Image (cartoon, rainbow, N blue to C red):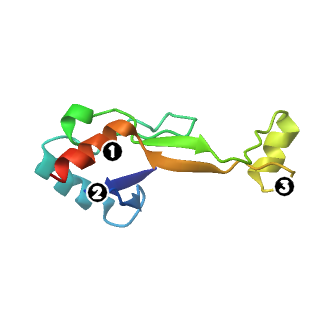
Amino acid sequence: MVFTFVTKDGQWQSIPWYADNIDELTQYLSDKFHQDLNETYLANSTEWKSIVRYPTHLKEKTLFTLTPCATYKEPKTFLDKILSSVGFGNLDTTQNITLTEEVQTELTNASR
């Protein structure tokens, strides 16, 4: 898991959840934004997932959208999935990561 910070220009930076001093950072951000950022919403998720924590009107909305690339080839069999996970097999599981439309709209409005 990571904390991802999105700037008004749509760029993002991420900090691993297990980085040094993450407790101090989450406490500072919790105080600044008046919400408990130590609470995790994705800890039991087995699929790739992202959520917004702030601003509060977007809280728990999806942050990123995954879109398969043009040459995407999904592994179908169990063996294909294993081979793909270690980089073998003739499979392209590359996906593009973009901000959701809701988040893009928020950034556009925030930039005005």
Residue pictured at 78% horizontal, 56% vertical = 87
Q: Which residue is mark 1?
A: 104
Can you tell which of label 1 and label 2 is closer to the viewer?
A: 1
9 in relation to 80, above or below: below
Amino acid at the residue labelled 3: Phe
Front in this rendered view, residue 3 or 62:
62
Q: Is residue 67 left or right of 20 when viewed as pictured?
A: right
Disc 3 and disc 1 in contact, CB within 8 angstroms: no
Observer able to see residue 39:
no
Residue pictured at 20% horizontal, 32% vertical = 57
Q: Is residue 68 left or right of 34 when viewed as pictured?
A: right
Residue pictured at 32% horizontal, 56% vertical = 5
Front in this rendered view, residue 93 or 79:
93
Q: Is residue 70 left or right of 110 when viewed as pictured?
A: right
Q: Is residue 7 left or right of 79 when viewed as pictured?
A: left
N-term mark: 1 or 2: 2
Observer able to see residue 18:
yes
| Residue 61 image offset from top left, x and y in percent | 35, 32
Amino acid at the residue labelled 2: Asp
Front in this rendered view, residue 40 or 104:
104
To which quarter of the image does residue 62 belong?
top left
Amino acid at the residue labelled 1: Gln
* Element under disc 1: helix
N-term mark: 2 or 3: 2
| Residue 69 image offset from top left, x and y in percent | 65, 48
Q: Which residue is mark 3?
A: 88
Q: Residues within 10 Å of mark 2 (few under 14, many from 20)?
A: some
Q: Which mark is residue 23?
A: 2
